Image (tube, rainbow, N blue to C red):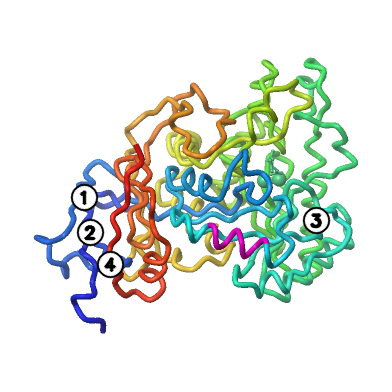
Amino acid sequence: MTAPTAHTRATLITGAAILGGERRDLAIVDGALVDPTTIDRDSADVVDASGLIALPGLVDLHTHLRQPGGEQAETVATGVRAAAAGGYTCVFAMANTNPVADTRAVVEQVHRLGQEAGLATVRPIGAVTVGLAGERLADMTMLARSAARVTVFSDDGKCVADAELMRRALEHAASLGAVVAQHAQDPDLTRGAVMHEGPLSAELGLAGWPSVAESSIVARDAMLAELTGARLHVCHVSTAGTVEVVRAAKARGIAITAEVTPHHLLLTEQLVRGYDARFKVNPPLRTDADVQALREALADGTIDIVATDHAPHAPEAKQTAFADAAFGMVGLETALGAVQEAMVETGLLDWAGVARVMSTAPAAIGQEAGYDAPLEIGSPAHVVLVDPAARTTIDTGSLRGRSANSPFLGIELPGSVRHVWRGGRRTVADAVVVEAVVEAAVGAAVGAAVGAAPLEGQVRA
Ligand SMILES: NC(=O)N[C@@H](CC(=O)O)C(=O)O
Ligand SMILES: [Zn+2]
Ligand SMILES: [Zn+2]
């Protein structure tokens, strides 16, 4: 036992609907959730959460933070600010940086920058192949054993197209207890492709990206996962055909998990009609039928998680002809609202389901500890309070990262992230990101469960 004087002041959250269900109080002491009846209510910091829903801190398995090398679009510090604003307490940073995250130096740098920024845990993803070049395997063992503790490997942005290399990557990952996250895109079927292939791409005169270029790679990889006994994760599933493949693979007992992005749950290729490059993303926006299949697959568990694929781009990369623009959309700040609209308001998922697909399950896939018992006493205090009745028209002011390439600008989304605690430390207060959250204090609170002196965060104007 630590001395009582070492404890931080308790926080008492009153009246929140826990995971959208029963209303009960939550109490935070020394970074952990404790029994609210055991704290001194008079000295506690009280947050009235009536009308709000309490969710666990969100975990994003697929974020592009752009550092090193793409700092004009995003840095680790600006990316975690966007993450906190969206209710995320942990993000996995994709490896397609410059230089690529295929060395100990890069993964440890990204991890350390995350600790310094303090607003969310940053878990670097390691490259599968050196330089994402698809030719030879990166030193996955070294990345896994680095201080950054890599548990997810991905060449995202590029497909590991070579089947032999993918087989070796899966074997290697299995020996490390890690998972390979595949960007499933057959390069031979998608040369020059910029939008979904179908009647609309013909009408618009844009090169099409056929659905089969995704589902065929997922089918191959599922069989390789079966052969190797490895865990395979499928990035950004976008088609009804891929859903069928994943469903069949799961029925065979193959260790496959899959993610869907908020934009693929809500938007269709029809948005490309205006040739606005904000709607250019990889994989592309698809059809109504695909959106419906993705929603049903997320509801029935065929698709395990929602991941943002937050892909910030500087204005120059998007202010160009559609065919020449960069692929990608930002998504951290709008993910929860998009999921509320696509899944909760349609009756497909309740809030406990949202907590599962946006926190518990992604943490499990990425082996991030502390998320397996959401909002339960004894767990680290990763807490999000959401106002489900709010409606917000998204504008650049809603976006807290460095880039504004959001498909939702000018669009109203439901819900609002009001407050966030990560390991008991406030990262968002009244919908405003609290800057200067110091990692050392959070680390002490989460890791050792002993009190650190509370540092007053500054509220960003
Ligand atoms: N999704 C995208 O359209 N772009 C991503 C790469 C990727 O996720 O494949 C990016 O890094 O910009
Ligand atoms: Zn990708
Ligand atoms: Zn991506």
Q: Main secondary structure of the magenta part?
A: helix
Q: Circle 2 is placed at which residue position?
A: 11
Which amino acid is tagged 2?
Answer: Thr
Q: For the magenta stretch, what is the residue range?
A: 106-113
> In this orientation, which residue lies closer to the viewer: 146 or 181?
146
The quarter of the image holding the N terminus is bottom left
Give the image quarter of residue 141: bottom right
Could you tell me which secondary element the residue under label 1 belongs to?
strand
> In this orientation, which residue lies closer to the viewer: 8 or 229?
8
Q: Is residue 450 magenta?
A: no
Q: CA distance from mark 1 to mark 4?
A: 20 Å
Q: Earlier in the sequence, mark 2 or mark 4?
A: 2
Residue 451 percent location from the top left of the image:
29, 72
Give the farthest residue toward the bottom: 1
Q: Circle 4 is placed at which residue position?
A: 453
Q: Is residue 111 magenta?
A: yes
Q: Earlier in the sequence, mark 3 or mark 2?
A: 2
Residue 169 located left or right of residue 280 = right
Q: Circle 3 is placed at which residue position?
A: 131
- In contact (CB < 8 Å): disc 2 and disc 1: yes
Q: Earlier in the sequence, mark 3 or mark 4?
A: 3
Q: CA distance from mark 3 to mark 1?
A: 48 Å
> In this orientation, which residue lies closer to the viewer: 71 or 198?
71
Query: What residue lies at 74% left-to-right and 49% top-to-bottom?
Result: 183
- In contact (CB < 8 Å): disc 3 and disc 2: no
Query: What residue lies at 59% left-to-right and 35% top-to-bottom?
Result: 263
